[in-house]
Amino acid sequence: MPTRISKDNFEKEVLQADKTVLADFYSDSCVPCKRLSPVLFTLEEEYAEKLKIVKININFDSELAEKYEVQAAPTLVFFKNGEEISRLRGAVKQAEIKEVIEKSV
């Protein structure tokens, strides 16, 4: 299950990670975010060796949302070696996410 992180452990969990990280910027009241959750769970299992998935609640961690210019939830930001390498916004399909993962890992 994707780990919920905050600004307190963002650097360690995302920027210093030894593999590609998919950061899901979400909100509890966001219906597309809720629909995306099981998809992310499946992808995390499928790509366990190559990908780490974390969740960041934009309501509680607005500093991170502002820093990474997250305008809406859900926003999926992909990081590799501490740098943003890709981004998907809105209710995206699993195939779209897999396409980015395949290019990123």
Image (cartoon, helix red, strand yellow):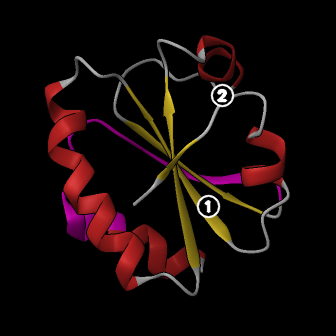
Name the secondary structure under disc 1: strand
Is 11 on the left-hand or right-hand side of 51? Answer: right
Task: Provide the residue span drawn in magenta.
Answer: 82-97
Q: How many neighbours does mark 2 have within 10 angstroms: few (below 14), some (14-19), or many (20 or more)?
A: few
| Residue occupying image coordinates x 23% and y 61% | 39
Pointer 2 with pointer 1, Cβ within 8 A: no
Residue 46 can be seen, yes or no: yes
| Quarter of the rendering occupied by the N terminus | bottom left
- In percent of width and height, residue 65 lies at 59, 21
| Quarter of the rendering occupied by the C terminus | bottom right
- In percent of width and height, residue 71 lies at 46, 17
Residue with the mark numbered 1: 21
- Asked if the magenta segment contains residue 46, the reply would be no
Looking at marks 2 and 1 on the same chain, the residue that comes earlier in the sequence is marked by 1
Three-letter amino acid code of the residue under disc 1: Val
| Residue occupying image coordinates x 83% and y 50% | 12
- Image quadrant in which you'd find residue 16: bottom right
The circle on residue 86 is: none
| Residue occupying image coordinates x 34% and y 33% | 74
Name the secondary structure under disc 2: loop
- Asked if the magenta segment contains residue 84, the reply would be yes
Residue 83 can be seen, yes or no: no
Q: Is residue 21 above or below residue 12?
A: below
Is 20 on the left-hand or right-hand side of 10? Answer: left
Residue with the mark numbered 2: 68
Q: Is residue 23 above or below residue 33?
A: below
Is 104 on the left-hand or right-hand side of 11? Answer: left
Which one is in front in this view, the residue at disc 2 or the one at disc 1?
A: 1
